[in-house]
Image (cartoon, rainbow, N blue to C red):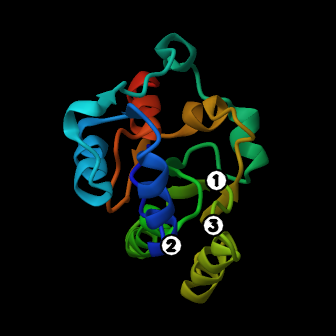
Amino acid sequence: RDYGEWMSRRYLLATRLANSLVTRIVTNSNQVKQLTKTVEGFPEDKIAVICNGIAAEAFRHRAPNIVFKRALQIPDGNKVVGLIANYRPMKRHETFVRAANEIVQKRDDIDFVLVGRDAVPGEPRKEIQQLAASLGITRRVHFAHADGNVRDFLSILDVGVNCSEGEGLSNAIMEYMAAEI
């Protein structure tokens, strides 16, 4: 189970029905365990927590990949602030872009990177790109997808951001920590 912010009323009803056929549910954090208990009505003693984990060694801080940074058209001397999260409402990419706009008004040596793909119907990434365009900051805000490997992005980040309104146990934060950002 994850945080389930996407779960519709109909899906929740189907989940509760399916839950009557299982003996245990596994969640990735205590917060998601409590959510599963409360929202799905599943008995707490039948919910196991197996926390997310990563192979930290794979993310250990490495020298910035300057070639990669240049490919994103980020000047060598600029600092980079990044948000690694697939596009869905709870990740609040718009908050990141609005904060980037505030910083861009005061500093000209910081660029911003959003890494992820659309994870819900529609085109949420395009909406965030349009927001950046409407604020006039497209030159400083870069959009990309990691194709399952975020290490090159992590190597160029000076600051890793999480704007989510709710998380179970964030993979991105674990990756930021392992990369020593």
The residue at which mark 2 appears reads as: 10
Mark 1 burial class by Cα count in 10 Å: few <14, some 14-19, many 20+:
many
Task: Please state which amino acid type lies under the numbered disc 3.
Answer: Val
Q: Residue at image x 50%, y 72%?
A: 10
Sequence-first tag of 1 and 2: 2
Q: CA distance from mark 3 to mark 1?
A: 12 Å
Q: Residue at image x 32%, y 62%?
A: 165
The residue at which mark 3 appears reads as: 120
Q: Position of residue 152 (x, y in %)?
A: 66, 32
Sequence-first tag of 3 and 2: 2
Nearer to us: label 1 or label 2: 2
Q: Secondary structure at mark 1?
A: loop
The residue at which mark 1 appears reads as: 116
Q: CA distance from mark 1 to mark 2?
A: 28 Å
User: Quick one: quadrant of the N terminus?
Assistant: top left
Mark 3–mark 2 CB contact (< 8 Å): no
Nearer to us: label 3 or label 1: 3
Q: Secondary structure at mark 3?
A: loop
Q: Position of residue 101 (x, y in %)?
A: 45, 75
Q: CA distance from mark 3 to mark 2?
A: 17 Å
Residue 26 is marked as: none
Task: Please state which amino acid type lies under the numbered disc 2.
Answer: Arg
